[in-house]
Image (cartoon, coloured by chain):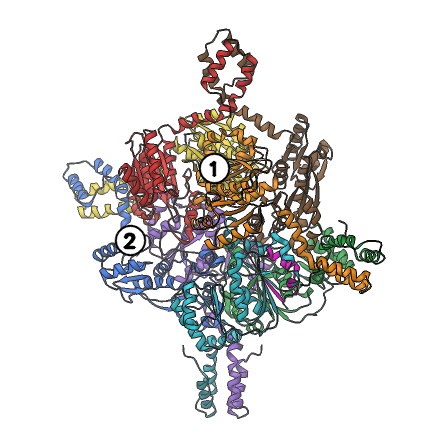
Chain colours: A orange, B yellow, C brown, D red, E purple, F blue, G green, H cyan
């Protein structure tokens, strides 16, 4: 694909002013510009969008060696935070051996954590201890984005007192990420208590009628609390990114 | 099917004592008894089971005339309460024209309400006003069984204060029937607050991701509150019958 | 439920300072406070949460008369905007006859629109013209929250040029609500172009394999664009409320 | 969260009676009570609900060491029964090595069984021998609650004679727990034979069209026997807890 | 498609014997025979298969006039029974006006019923009265095939005594068709009682968790009774045809 | 349960004839008979039903030792064929070591095959070679029932010539069992070619849209060939039993 | 969005050659070109893609007046064929009254049919007469694209002779569109007989286990015939467009 | 099955010309031809259809030895390309040890690649790197068919610039195969950009709401781009075969 970069463009315009080419030919060549640079042009948009964003590596399906190599590249080519999520024990060990321990939360590890650089206090709550791994990923992604956050575990709605003991935290947060499997009811309750953005993460925790998280996903969408939004099953990373868009 | 009723049996035994038949033949004929009376024998069980139970007529699919006739037969052949549920306007009018107004709740009507004759105070709660018709059926069925009851509407979990304002009623009830559509989260919360039997009724209230009640049904089964039981979608009648078995 | 209101509380404390009751009894009575006022206490939270929020009436399942009456009550008891959504022709006519025309968008009508009082510019886009009714509800709800907004219809991904012609609007918006049925792919594309919050609304537009919006809902959750959040099927109202939480 | 505990409260009231603070300030601080102690207040409710309940540890996802430690803590901090369910061979061995054999039923083990302390005779029936593990968990949970019980295995409806041979037990029980996979028809039949509470447990037994228990769950809900309630798939523990709420 | 019919074939062979064409050419032309007559050849198979079968007209989607015309054609062109199933009131009236009343069962009507011409006694049972329309279609189709049959309604498994009162009929039948909606359990029970072919018909009777017959279909397939076969939802016609293949 | 067996019954009647008990008492005791012997009575029915049937052991979930022991018991206590199906390599080895090789087909083994003792020739066809294991189970079960049979593999409808090459076998068989995964179309085609009973077995062969056999099951039920019946997914055993009921 | 069209571009270049602007400024303005004209640029692609394509109006959800107006606009602004599909009786009448009868096929009407202008002979087959409306839409869309075509109805696989009677047509066609509901098996069979492109259209014909076309869609995807492609349920229009892409 | 082969046919005709048999008898025997050779006749059709097609071996479920043997047979009995797909490491090694390395792409290997012998340039695009294995199979199958092709990976719609950078390739290709998991949106976008045949392959890439590829499959069918066709989940082989039918 014959693209026209800036030096070429300047040369072309100089040829025009020098009379070496006519206006028609320049117009014809410039007409190709939109096609030619379409992709590159959008890159700018995307670059702006991604500016300052942490680079994330998704562990599943990669060999430990691939993880080590990709993390190495990201660390070398950028200066921002680099995050490895849902890694296996072997992946974590291999990466730690090469790049040092990093900031670890469950099966995720973060290099070059930026420190709290963004306004807004995020609260991450889980309905049960089994939702922990999803929260780990979420918490480390938020940290990678530069957020301060609190995390409260195991406040599912069947023990309402545990939830209400954290009422002040819930109402004070600038955004709440609710991580819940089984019936996912915590999202509805938090949505009714907080006026801030509430992002619900259904998890595949539970068995039988939980249908690997589909029940929680549907229930969160059928929620009676208006204005609660939902991300994909077990998608703690996505919930953190959603909050990063919001705050 | 040649059954052997009691008078035949006595005649047979008299024939035996009178020497008109031998023991072998009596044994042979008696051996057929279990087969012959199998059905009838079980009738006794079923009769015991049904003793004092209200007779219920399910409206859908019947003509107003059929409703009138069936109600008439049940009133004539028994002395207990007679309940017509999920009736159309036309069915209700036709039955009222023939049998008088009865005790009406939504689309259900009860004749010969027994008054509070059973121990135990039942609480019926709904998550939203749209769950009302299911609660109507449930309440009238409980009344037909002779229960005293309270009903509290519209205390869905997205407005936790409305639910907690009724906390004393919830904890005092001998059984709680929770009627909720959408995400059905109220069952989990009530299940965590009450130590009494909690029967959850998913309703087809809601749209889209509610999947006509399937989401609520699955969510109630995936509930994090142990010991909550569930009946079928919109089955207010069944929930009342379940409580009648329990108390 | 024997609640203890403020005048009672003051009387009780005066009795204590006057020596008419002992400390023990006051403590005992105060211990009941948390129970007694539990619901009321939370009301404050909810009131704060709801402060300034538009009151919304959901049309389906209500008679025109009920709509008229509820709108009347909300107009009388508050001073904020009052919104009627998903109304039938008859409901709209009845309400207009009583309360005047209001600000109408499709099947929704808004009384006392607040004018643009909130910071943040919202973009509402639809994939096809058939998604219009959901967008109508969404737009009027945003207006009721005091947002300025733009709306762009029919920029589904199969005609990428239509979408890209609005690229500047997409990248400039403080939040984008993407309303799409069928395969819901627009959410992924917009999510990749904008760094702002993107709320996706699956619609029941389409037939056959669209499964009444379930396909779009699942596809939006399986989206390859990170940080996009999703609300329920056809839930334009919920998407607007979600944005109101965010901005 | 600045809570106000009883000693603080007494000090506050003494300050009031001593004139060190005014009534207004006391009222202001007491107004915060409902919020502050909301969670703790509910704890009382929950404690009442849980009083005398066995503590249960759910094996899956825990290491043998975690099981040993949690069981140890529960044994040390309470005096009631402690139950470990769905344990692996390794978990069972580790716990037995530390705490002795306990009362074992399949993959569950119970420490400090309370003996039959509750009124009511419970019957646990299974449709097939493959439903056994769910029944094991159920039976041991009932024992932990202090129930006397009978268990009858393998009386699925395709061999009606086996079921009817136990007719007296079915009709005599104060509650029946029906554990069945495949098509779950046993619940309907038992529901028709017994007037007592019938709790149905769908199991994931079967293959193909059994859909891992979903078919049995749906069939039990679609059951033609009124008043039968259902718990989640394979949830023998939940069924026992449901009965504990009922009797 | 250049077919070669018999007269052509004879002419060809005569040309051969007359020496007007050589063997090679005849072989070449005959090689095309299999293709040419493929369809017609199979017609013979199909004709044998269909020999004596009743002609059936499926009502839904046809105008009354179409029904009248098709029935007229079938009566004119054949001499066997002609069956119209699932007809509307209007279709039935129009057909009766033209062709006389026929033998009617619910929404089906049969002309030229053959009388009992086939060996084998078929028993048709329904679980509930609501399954009646499917049984009507089934019974009339069996009659059209020349079977003698008995029909027993409303012997669902929740009232086992009603079923067992018909035990002799069940065990004596040469084939049993079990028609049941809701949870479809009757098929399992009958399958366990009879050694004859048992064809199960799931019906769309029931609501909510019955999922329009899908639950019954799945449950019948997950049945614990071996050798029971299943036809499609509400397919009373198909069940009768299946029995006609068997006996 | 106080049953009354025959010797007791004779003693009772002798007491009556001897005047040691009165008629009333005998009647009273006899009235209990139907209850008491209900189960045993049905045993006769079941025994008749099972007479001559092969005993089948289902391998999955059993240890090799359990298989050996159960087979041993069945061989010792009966004289008919004994069938072990879906056995693992280890189970097959263990059983062969103890009981000899038997008649083996894939993962099933049959002891004491009865030889062809039943009228009727059965044809077993598979759509693809991957359906083989289901056919193995089916073929050996048919053999255990005493049927003669033919088996034709890999005649799926995408290669119609392979199917039509066996047309004579298809039309000659007294019953056809069609085993097919993927889209299961073979059942429709065979159902149109044969007038004999056609039993369709959906298999879990295929991937993706095959949904583990659910697609084939649904497709077979939606089949345009009337009178085809269906058994559960991969249920070759059940299809053979169904044919045994038919012929 | 300030776009830069060709006249502006020429003016700009003339300003450059005239020295009225510097090269830097021209480069800066040209850099905006890719963004500015992104949408328009793609329009060219889309225009090429759409060149000569018939304009299609989808009837459902539009008033008869809207149909009349849209058809009028398309007829006025272009010179190609204009197609109205899935129209109601009222829509068809209104459009015919305004624009004349057109070329009608079922519920679709075509104005300015182009005549056979494209190479390639297309065969459209249906499995049953009930698939007719989908075939009507398909046939008229093919005609609008300028294809010659044959249509064969009612050759479902349960009557294989009907299909094979058309074997020559099937093997001769340049593309085959297979329209089938129920189990959709016809696509597999045709796919095995023809080496040309085969496009399968699942239809919502059938009931019960047909699941409104989902069964046929899944079955066609699980098909054992390689290289068959599938379009959406009832999407006759889409199948014709797919063929237009291919030939 | 008594077939009549050519030598028999010639003998028969000679008998006829020699007068040893009469015309009637020859006609009678020839009438059997269609039945007799039905299958063989179709073989010719199938052979034509398959002429020049690569032979494909599907790895899963086969032992390495079986793979080696089948590949050997195909290489020996034909002269065209032989393809082994979805092979395991062990299968690949075993085959390579016996037959040499071949042309390998991921888990597929091709022997006797034909070189670019077919007109038409195919573009294979993937939405993400995880779709690679499906693309490998697709690319090698296309190569086996003799196509020239380009492959572009990782141009999912969330990074539109990457897709647009390849716009010229997309619009220039004679056919595009779009391989995408998750929400599968790439198919809609490509379908809108290219006027050539677009074959979409949903992949099982993704987790949670991706439902193992079902979401992508449904979304592709619900696509707003007309004329896009779809093959089964992960079916890269099928997509290549579909293109081979088209070009």
Q: Is residue F184 above or below residue D11?
A: below
Circle 2 crowding by C-alpha within 10 Å: few under 14, some 14–19, many from 20: some
E93 or H78, nearer to the observer: H78
Q: Secondary structure at mark 1?
A: loop
The N terminus of chain H lies in quadrant: bottom left
Q: Which residue is mark 1?
A: A127
E153 vs B186: above or below = below
Question: As drawn, is E103 to the left or to the right of C44?
Answer: left
Question: Which residue occupies 33% across, 56% down?
Answer: E195
Stretch in magenta: H169-195
**Distance (Cα) linking label 1 and label 2:** 39 Å
Would you place residue F234 above or below residue B67 in this image?
below
Q: Which of labels 1 and 2 is toward the front?
A: 1
**Residue F63: numbered disc:** 2
Q: Work out whether residue D243 can be spotted.
A: yes
Q: Residue at x 24, y 47 (%)?
A: B31
Q: Which chain contains the residue that carries disc 1?
A: A
The quadrant of the picture occupied by the C terminus of chain H is bottom right
Q: Is residue C157 left or right of residue D85?
A: right
State yes or no: residue H246 in magenta: no
Query: In the image, residue F208 lies at what x, y percent?
Result: 49, 57
Q: Does residue H170 belong to the magenta stretch?
A: yes
């Amino acid at each position: 694909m014959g693209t026209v970069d800036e030096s070429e463009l300047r040369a072309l315009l100089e040829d025009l002013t020098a009379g070496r080419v006519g206006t028609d030919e320049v117009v014809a060549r410039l007409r190709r510009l939109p096609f030619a640079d379409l992709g590159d042009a959008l890159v700018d948009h995307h670059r702006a969008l991604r500016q300052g964003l942490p680079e994330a590596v998704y562990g599943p399906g990669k060999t430990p060696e691939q993880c080590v190599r990709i993390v190495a590249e990201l660390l070398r080519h950028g200066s921002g935070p680099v995050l490895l999520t849902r890694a296996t024990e072997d992946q974590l060990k291999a990466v730690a051996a090469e790049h040092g321990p990093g900031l670890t939360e469950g099966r995720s590890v973060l290099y070059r954590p930026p420190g709290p650089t963004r306004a807004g206090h995020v609260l991450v709550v889980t309905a049960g201890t089994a939702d922990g791994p999803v929260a780990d990923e979420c918490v480390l992604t938020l940290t990678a984005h530069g957020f301060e956050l609190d995390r409260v575990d195991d406040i599912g709605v069947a023990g309402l007192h545990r939830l209400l003991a954290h009422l002040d935290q819930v109402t004070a947060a600038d955004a709440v990420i609710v991580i819940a499997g089984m019936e996912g009811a915590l999202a509805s309750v938090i949505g009714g208590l907080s006026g801030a953005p509430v992002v619900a993460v259904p998890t595949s925790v539970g068995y039988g009628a939980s249908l690997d998280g589909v029940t929680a996903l549907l229930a969160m969408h059928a929620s009676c609390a208006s204005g609660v939004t939902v991300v994909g099953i077990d998608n703690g990373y996505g919930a953190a990114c959603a909050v990063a868009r919001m705050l």
